[in-house]
Amino acid sequence: MTKAQLCQRIEEERIIAVVRKVYGDDLMFLAEALLDAGISTMEVTFDQQDPDCLKKTSDAVKAVLGAFGSRCTCGAGTVLTLAQTDAAANAGASLIISPNCSESVIRHTVELGLVSIPGCMTPSEILAAHDAGADFVKVFPAGSLGTDYIKHISAPISHVKFLAVGGINAENSRAFLKAGCTGAGIGGSLTNRALIAARDREQLTKNAAQYVAIARAFHQEASK
């Protein structure tokens, strides 16, 4: 899949699953449940408190792509440094997602031919990220900022594609899409660790399916 095709997939499917501190068999179980629900794009985050995060996240990305590469796209999240960017790229990640606006990470991501999704809050950060080459801008923490904030910044910055991340759930995800976001990154409600530990695939898939239904309905409405 080319970078342009991946960007198009994100715009059409509108959901990126944010996977934090889930590895090994748990990750394989979760990934399959998400795929069964129709979520084909995910990010495995770097745990910045873990000194072994470079290897753990790289191995996780490789594992997901090795098992499901024909069905899914896997990127790396919480990418803060060039070293983490390179590690993710070498593992096969096609998305580089950050909680902050690091122009050096953005430019390096673009040089590698990967999709750049930095995290921003203010209009200045958003435009700096866009000017550095970001493909999408992750508005973070969107849940705290609210949909009115998205509406207000979308008016003068309508050329930037926003993804809402942080505090997005089944109750507010459609409102963020309606406010002007291209899509959303969703974590805890998609990746519930208790459900993973209990191997409750049915509930994991059911939880994910509700987001897919919301996104598909909105995409169909927006395409009319």
Image (cartoon, grey):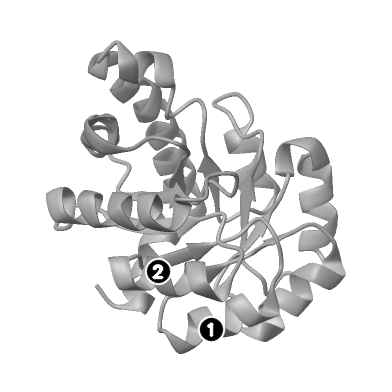
Residue 221 is situated, as x and y percent measured from the top left of the image, at 48, 47
Q: Please give the name of the residue rendered at 43% of the width and 29% of the height, measured from the top-left corner.
A: 190
Residue, disc 1:
108
Residue, disc 2:
87
Residue 121 is situated, as x and y percent measured from the top left of the image, at 79, 57
Label 2: element kind? helix
Residue 97 is situated, as x and y percent measured from the top left of the image, at 54, 61
Q: Is residue 198 left or right of residue 172?
A: left
Q: Residues within 10 Å of mark 2 (few under 14, many from 20)?
A: some
Up/down of 121 relative to 134, above or below? above
In this view, the residue in front, 104 or 208, is 104
The quadrant the N terminus occupies is: bottom left
Q: Please give the name of the residue rendered at 40% of the width and 83% of the height, measured from the top-left corner.
A: 113
In this view, the residue in front, 151 or 46, is 46
Q: Please give the name of the residue rendered at 28% of the width and 29% of the height, measured from the top-left corner.
A: 26
Which mark, by number, is residue 183?
Answer: none
The single residue placed furthest to the front in the displayed view is: 51
Tell me where residue 106 sits by quadrant. Answer: bottom right
Q: Please give the name of the residue rendered at 79% of the width and 52% of the height, measured from the top-left corner.
A: 151
Which dot, 2 or 1, sits closer to the camera? 2
Asked if residue 223 shows in the view, the reply is no
